[in-house]
Amino acid sequence: MTEALTVAAAAGGGAIVQAAGTDAWNGIRDAAARMLGRSEVQREQAESERLDRTRAVLEAAEEGEVERVQAAQAAVWQTRFEALLEELPDSGRQQVVSELEHLAALARAARPAETVHNDFRGARFDRSQVQGSGTMTVTNNYAE
């Protein structure tokens, strides 16, 4: 298997893990089940059930085990996507790679925005500069 196919399969596995618990889950689950089911209704249903079990495992992960469980589940789905890519003719592989890239994009878009909070209460600023990027909200609490 080429590196590009392995990367695509890994992106698909990561998308499954990232999407669990987000609003994008149903769309990503259905797309992954269709992809793995390859137009066979029973196979697609079985994949949907596997995906739902994965979500349940991810949601049940105990604190301190979350990263390990996520890595394990991503590896499971990467392996499934790699097996699919290996069994397809070259013409079908590119379609699946595109679908996997789309799943990864959907999962990235569904991630909650990261928030950073800085508390400068009691700090004194004299000719100071703050550098950074992204969105910054500044609240001056001069009364405190």
Image (cartoon, rainbow, N blue to C red):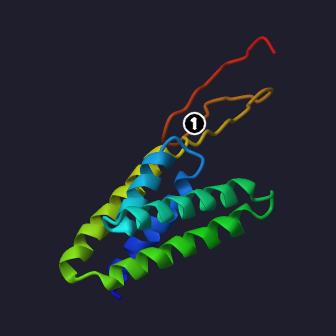
What is the total number of numbered labels drawn onto the structure image? 1
Left or right, 104 with reference to 18: left
Within the image, what quadrant is residue 33 found in?
Answer: bottom left
Q: Position of residue 116 (x, y in %)?
A: 64, 39
Q: Amino acid at mark 1?
A: Gln
- The residue that appears at 37% across and 78% down in the rendered structure is 84
Placement of the C terminus among the 4 image quadrants: top right
Q: Secondary structure at mark 1?
A: loop
Above or below for 12 versus 139: below
Residue at the location (50% across, 48% down)?
Answer: 25
x and y percentages locating residue 79 in the rendered image: 49, 79
**Front-most of 40 and 8?**
40
Looking at the image, which residue sits at the far front?
42
Q: In the image, residue 130 lies at what x, y percent?
A: 57, 37
In the picture as drawn, the residue positioned furthest to the left comes out as 91
The residue lying toward the viewer, choosing from 19 and 29, is 29
The quadrant where residue 119 appears? top right
Q: Is residue 91 above or below residue 16?
A: below
Pick the residue in front: 76 or 39.
Answer: 39
Pinpoint residue 95: horizontal percent, then vertical percent.
24, 68
From what the image shows, is residue 52 above or below residue 70? above
Residue with the mark numbered 1:
129
Residue lying at the far bottom of the rendered structure: 1
Q: Residue at x 64, y 73 (%)?
A: 72
Q: Residues within 10 Å of mark 1 (few under 14, many from 20)?
A: few
* Image quadrant containing the N terminus: bottom left
